[in-house]
Amino acid sequence: MADTDNEAAEADVTEDDWAAAMQEQAVEDMGTPVAQPASFQSFDGGGGAKPSSMNDFELILDIPVQLTVELGRTRISIRNLLQLAHGSVVELDALAGEPMDVLVNGTLIAQGEVVVVNDKFGIRLTDIITPSERVKKLRA
């Protein structure tokens, strides 16, 4: 489904849109500032208007992100990968009962445990990773 959404979005982009974007990039590369819409000036840290209402924050609330729950990882050779068949078992590095990692766009944001809700798998969040903890992990 995501592929069809991406294909539809790409079909909406015309050559004129690409030409305009390339022209903006060329002007920026030459050191001439490009005027930005007022709604984006507050994000560049350069004296633009400060967000004054929740409407500014609500602009990003509908942006889709990729949420991934990771059971575990393993490394296998291509030879062993090609030998996998229906019913094969691949051993992961995670232990049974260990919390699962919850990632948003590849960044760890929480840990949780697997639950079953209405015959579907879900995850109950047990630990939320704070921004300061994420920064500490980046430095380690």
Image (cartoon, rainbow, N blue to C red):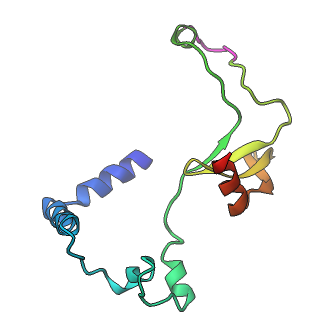
Q: Identify the image quadrant of the C terminus.
A: top right
The residue lying furthest to the right in this view is: 97
State whether residue 62 is above or below residue 74. Answer: below
Residue beneath the point at 21% across and 70% down = 31
Please give left or right for residue 120 compared with residue 11 in the image. right
Q: Which is more toward the observer, 113 or 23?
A: 23
The percent position of residue 68, horizontal first and vertical second, equals: 62, 46
The percent position of residue 39, horizontal first and vertical second, equals: 39, 83
Is residue 68 visible from the viewing direction of this image?
Answer: yes
Residue beneath the point at 70% across and 16% down = 89
Residue 88: within the magenta? yes
The percent position of residue 126, horizontal first and vertical second, equals: 83, 53
Please give the range of residues in magenta.
Answer: 83-89
Look at the magenta stretch and give its main secondary structure. loop
Is residue 117 visible from the viewing direction of this image?
Answer: no
Residue beneath the point at 60% across and 16% down = 76
Q: Which is more toward the observer, 51 or 64?
A: 51
Image quadrant of residue 119? top right
State whether residue 30 is above or below residue 118. Answer: below
State whether residue 86 is above or below residue 117. Answer: above
Image quadrant of residue 32? bottom left
Residue 90: within the magenta? no
Please give left or right for residue 120 compared with residue 76 in the image. right
